[in-house]
Image (tube, grey):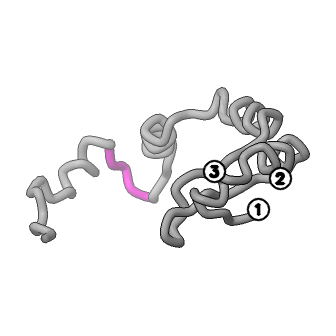
Amino acid sequence: MSDISITEAKNRLPALLREVEAGEALRITRRGRTVAVVLGVREYERLVAAAKGRPSLKEAVSTYRQNACFGWELSPEEVDEWRDPSEGRRVL
């Protein structure tokens, strides 16, 4: 995967799109930090198809908690009671 600045991407867009169509992925950067990734449509569709049917993080954690065996007989509600309900410290 190549890194390219926004300015360079703007100036070379047709050539970069040909590279992407050929299978190359590009990271677009602003001041050295990645702000976007450009993928070819085939790679994008492959990633979308791979993600279909996967549970969300919330669903996966819920399923894990229901099926996990820690050696104790605790319900998810009992585990929730362990958590500190405060908002925590303030971060400036």
Question: Where 56 falls versus 73 (above or below)?
Answer: above
In the rendered image, residue 27 lying in the magenta stretch gets the answer no
| Quarter placement of the N terminus | bottom right
Q: At 67% from the left edge and 53% from the top edge, which residue is drawn?
A: 11
Give whichever of 70, 1 is nearer the camera: 1
Disc 1 is placed on an element classified as: loop
Question: Which residues make up the magenta segment?
Answer: 71-75
Q: Which residue is mark 1?
A: 1
Q: Quadrant of residue 51?
A: top right
Q: Which residue is mark 2?
A: 24
Task: Report x, y in % for residue 12.
Answer: 73, 52
C-alpha distance separating marks 2 and 1: 7 Å
Q: At 50% from the left edge and 36% from the top edge, which residue is drawn?
A: 56
Mark number, residue 86: none
Task: Report x, y in % for residue 52.
Answer: 66, 28
Q: At 78% from the left edge and 43% from the top edge, which residue is drawn?
A: 14
Tags 2 and 1 in contact by the CB under 8 Å rule?
Answer: yes
C-alpha distance separating marks 1 and 3: 18 Å
Q: Quadrant of residue 18?
A: top right
Residue type at numbered disc 2? Glu
Q: Which residue is mark 3?
A: 10
Mark positioned earlier in the residue sequence (1 or 3): 1
